[in-house]
Image (cartoon, rainbow, N blue to C red):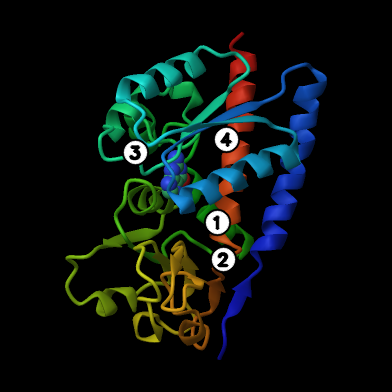
C-alpha cells in the first residue's frame, strides 16, 4: 500500500484565489489590508520565511512592510516600534518573527502586540480565547493543518489524533484545534515513554518536533493520516520534514510533503488572518 500524497499546491492556490478576491473588495472601498513583519537579527531561515510572507502579501494585494532590525536592537527599541505599529491605521496585522535574539524577552514583545493585530495568535489573551473556544483569529500553522485535513473529507470527530511536539507555536494550539473538532487528542513530547506505541494508535498523526526524519514507518498505523509540520535539513543539507517520507509513504493512508504543503499553507492562513483583522478594524470604525 502506498500513501496518497497531499497536494498542498492546489489547496493553497484555491484558498489564495478567494483571499485575493476578498482583498480586492476591501481595496475598492479604500481599505487595503496591511501587514507589518518585524525581523530582528540575521537568522537565515527566518530571513527566507519573512521574504516568502512579503511575497505572498503582494500576490494577493495585501500591503506589507518588513522592518529588518539589527541583532543588537534593544528591547526598548523593539517595543517602541510595536507601539507605533499598534497605532498605525494602515497596519491590521503585526508579526514579529521568532526566535528573537537572546537579550530580548520574547513574551514581553508578544504582550505588546495589540490583541486585534495579533495575526499569529501568540498573545496570551488570544491563546486564552482559543482555549475556551471563543471565536478569534487562529494560529497560522495549526489552522493550516486543519484546512489540509478538511480537504481529505475524512471524519475528525471521534478519531484518535496524536500530536508529537508541545511548542506554543504548533503542538499545543494544534491539540486545541483538533479537540474543538471532537478528536480524541494525545500530545507526545521528548519525555514521552514508548512513543511508537502511542503514535501507532493515531488515526491522525501530526509531527511537529523539529527533528529530521524521526517519524518512521514503525511509528505509523497503516492507513493513518500523517501531516508533517517539520522543516529541517537532512545530512546532505536538503530540506526535509520530521517524517521519513519514503519510509512512511509505504504504509500511511495520506501523507503531506515537505516542502510544499504545511509551509505555504501557514502563510496562506497569515494572509487570511490579516484580511480578517482588516475586516474587524473596518467594522469597528
Ligand atoms: N517562527 C517560526 N514559525 C513562526 C510563526 O508562525 N510566526 C512567527 N512570528 N515566528 C515564527
Q: x%, y% of residue 175? A: 36, 53
- Whether residue 172 is visible here, answered yes or no, is yes
In the rendered structure, which disc, 3 or 4, sits on the residue that comes first in sequence? 3
The residue sitting at 28% across, 27% down in the picture is 108
Q: Residue 180, which numbered label?
A: none
> Where is ligand 1, by quadrant?
top left
In the rendered structure, which disc, 4 or 2, sits on the residue that comes first in sequence? 2
Q: Are marks 1 and 4 in contact (CB under 8 Å)?
A: no
What is the spatial separation of the Cα atoms under label 4 and label 2, in whole angstroms? Answer: 22 Å
Q: x%, y% of residue 275? A: 64, 31
In the rendered structure, the answer to whether residue 258 lies left or right of residue 177 reads right
The residue sitting at 41% across, 62% down in the picture is 158
Q: How many marks?
A: 4
Which residue is situated farthest in the right direction here? 28
Residue, disc 3: 131
Q: Residue 273, which numbered label?
A: 4
Q: Are marks 4 and 2 in contact (CB under 8 Å)?
A: no
Q: Is residue 268 above or below residue 10?
A: above
Q: Is mark 3 within 8 Å of ligand 1?
A: no
Q: Is residue 42 above or below residue 256?
A: above
Q: Is residue 118 above or below residue 240?
A: above
Q: Nearer the viewer, mark 4 or mark 2?
A: 2
Residue, disc 1: 263
Between 35 and 51, the one nearer to me in the picture: 51
Q: x%, y% of residue 126? A: 39, 30
Q: Are marks 2 and 1 in contact (CB under 8 Å)?
A: yes
Residue, disc 2: 259
- Whether residue 142 is visible here, answered yes or no, is no
Amino acid at each position: 500500500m502506498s500513501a496518497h500524497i497531499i497536494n498542498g499546491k492546489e489547496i493553497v492556490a484555491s484558498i489564495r484565489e478567494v483571499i485575493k478576491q476578498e482583498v480586492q473588495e476591501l481595496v475598492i472601498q479604500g481599505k487595503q489590508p496591511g501587514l507589518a513583519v518585524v525581523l530582528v537579527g540575521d537568522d537565515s531561515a527566518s530571513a527566507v520565511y519573512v521574504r516568502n510572507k512579503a511575497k505572498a502579501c503582494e500576490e494577493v494585494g495585501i500591503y506589507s512592510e518588513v522592518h529588518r532590525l539589527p541583532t543588537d536592537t534593544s528591547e526598548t527599541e523593539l517595543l517602541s516600534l510595536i507601539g507605533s505599529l499598534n497605532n498605525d491605521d494602515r497596519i491590521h496585522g503585526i508579526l514579529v518573527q521568532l526566535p528573537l535574539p537572546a537579550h530580548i524577552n520574547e513574551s514581553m514583545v508578544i504582550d505588546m502586540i495589540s490583541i486585534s493585530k495579533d495575526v499569529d495568535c501568540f498573545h496570551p489573551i488570544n491563546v486564552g480565547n482559543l482555549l475556551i473556544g471563543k471565536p478569534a483569529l487562529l494560529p497560522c500553522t495549526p489552522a493550516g493543518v486543519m484546512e489540509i485535513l478538511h480537504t481529505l473529507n475524512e471524519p475528525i470527530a471521534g478519531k484518535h489524533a496524536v500530536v508529537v511536539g508541545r511548542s506554543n507555536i504548533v503542538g499545543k494550539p494544534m491539540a486545541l484545534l483538533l479537540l474543538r473538532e471532537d478528536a480524541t487528542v494525545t500530545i507526545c513530547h521528548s519525555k514521552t515513554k514508548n512513543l511508537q506505541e502511542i503514535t501507532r494508535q493515531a488515526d491522525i498523526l501530526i509531527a511537529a518536533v523539529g527533528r529530521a526524519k524521526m517519524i518512521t514507518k514503525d511509528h505509523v498505523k497503516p492507513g493513518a493520516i500523517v501531516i508533517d509540520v517539520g522543516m529541517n535539513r537532512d545530512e546532505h543539507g536538503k530540506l526535509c520534514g520530521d517524517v521519513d517520507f519514503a519510509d512512511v509513504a509505504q504504509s500511511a493512508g495520506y501523507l503531506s510533503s515537505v516542502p510544499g504543503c504545511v509551509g505555504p499553507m501557514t502563510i496562506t492562513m497569515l494572509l487570511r488572518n490579516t484580511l480578517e483583522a482588516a475586516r474587524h478594524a473596518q467594522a469597528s470604525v
